[in-house]
Amino acid sequence: MFYSFFYMSFHNSHLCKNKLIFLAIVSILLTSVFSCTQTDSLDTPQHSQPDFYGNEKANGTHISQQSTAKYVFATAKTCEKFQDFAAPEHYIIDKPLQLKQAAPASFPNANEQTLLNGLSPGDMVAVNIENGEGFNGNYIIDSNGLINIPLLPPIDVLGLPTNIVAEKISIEFIKKEIFKAATAHVTLQVLHWSEIEVSVSGAVFNPGRVLINETLPQKLEQDSFSYGDHSNKRLLSEALRAASGVRPDAKLDQVILLRKGWRLEADMTGILTGDPVTDYPLITGDRIIVPTTGCFQSNLVRPSQITPKGFRIFMSNLIAPAMSNSNAAVGRYSANVPYGTRLLQSAISANCVGGKQWTNAPRKVVLVSVNPLTKQTQVIERSIEELMRQSNRESINPYLMPNDAVACYDSDVTNLRDIANTIADFIIPFKLL
């Protein structure tokens, strides 16, 4: 009997001890879970709404170059003089442009078409001279912009139209006394317009040097058997499109074209409004500058000939940790959306909206965007319910820009359910003791 009492006392004390340990572990677990949840939960991003790039009512953004690098990997060198190396340049239109190359105010009106409709390296032209069998033929402008005709010195034709080039060739024949003035009649026709390289800077998504008017080899072979050629891709609008399009802060009525020291301001707004617009032809070496207003213009946020048709954004919507890259869709990390897409539309595309209303409605969506003017990363947070009910407010439902990131976070109900499941995973092993 004493043995039985001792066994029961020991057994009860052992059970009590296990319960105390169990309660202590549960208490520690609950405290840790709630403290971690409170500490690691998503804080509301502090950001001034009017300054967010994508807000229609933005009042303008201060523009500066990229900041000095804080860390270098060569201790004996300094990066201070490279702080603005290859940084995008922004040109404000309310002050004179400080360009590296001085240029006159504009093209002379009398020679405007002469300077703009010219030849470039790689163009193929047909030269025809009466009784000039040894000189007639097809010629390609070399990389220096010269045309090489037998018995004549190289003739500079870069940027010149065909009628001026024909006159220069005639004069050279007369100078060399190959033909008399009465018989040195030269005709010149373009057989093929080659691809050209131009530079685009300012308020475009991808500034730099672009290649336009790429031609398929079979088309070049066909053109060599016919006189005349037309190119609709050696134009100012094509250069803007090749630079991924103009940004919403672009000043389209003062797009600047620089060529051989000359300067022209072009009004390209007609491409978006439907009004007549002069789309100037380009030659190799042209430089295009798109000034910025510093303000977001919602009228420019739509597909057009000089704006992006669409772009990619990064999406994340994991309701639970993925067990593999395949389940997490790593590799299919981005989605293509049309230009003009807003945050609510991307949230719907990411499957953040819909489902069980009581549990899914309190979900949140986060937008991570880089301001193209200041190069600063901006983060804003919106609740799905807020987006659905106030989608007409620009500050609540901003426009998306290329390479933005959209992430969804679960509702509080889902979070509590996951916490309960986590606690249950710790309790079950103790129940089995």
Image (cartoon, rainbow, N blue to C red):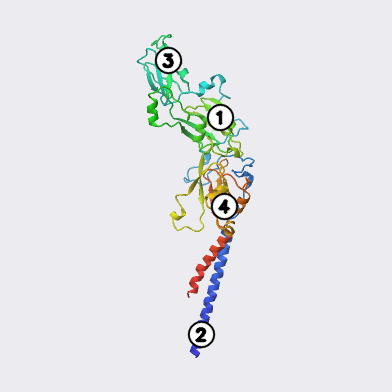
Badge 4 marks a residue whose secondary structure is strand
Q: Dot 2, how many residues are within 10 Å of its Cα: few (below 14), some (14-19), or many (20+)? A: few
| Residue that appears at 58% across and 54% down | 364
Label whose residue precedes the other's in the sequence (1 or 4): 1
> From this viewpoint, which residue is outermost toward the bottom?
1
| Number of the label disc, if any, that sits on residue 365 | 4
How far separated are the C-alphas under marks 2 and 1?
95 Å
Label whose residue precedes the other's in the sequence (2 or 1): 2
Label whose residue precedes the other's in the sequence (4 or 3): 3
**CB of mark 2 within 8 Å of CB of mark 1?**
no
Which is closer to the viewer, label 2 or label 3? Answer: 3
- Name the residue tied to disc 3: 186
| Residue that appears at 48% across and 47% down | 334
Label whose residue precedes the other's in the sequence (2 or 4): 2
Label whose residue precedes the other's in the sequence (2 or 3): 2
**CB of mark 4 within 8 Å of CB of mark 3?**
no
Label whose residue precedes the other's in the sequence (3 or 1): 3
Q: Amino acid at mark 1?
A: Ile
- Name the residue tied to disc 2: 8
Badge 1 marks a residue whose secondary structure is strand
| Number of the label disc, if any, that sits on residue 256 | 1
Which is closer to the viewer, label 1 or label 4? Answer: 4
Q: Dot 3, how many residues are within 10 Å of its Cα: few (below 14), some (14-19), or many (20+)? A: many
Q: Amino acid at mark 4?
A: Val
Nearest the viewer among 89 and 396 is 396
Q: What percent of the width, then of the height, locates residue 340?
A: 56, 42
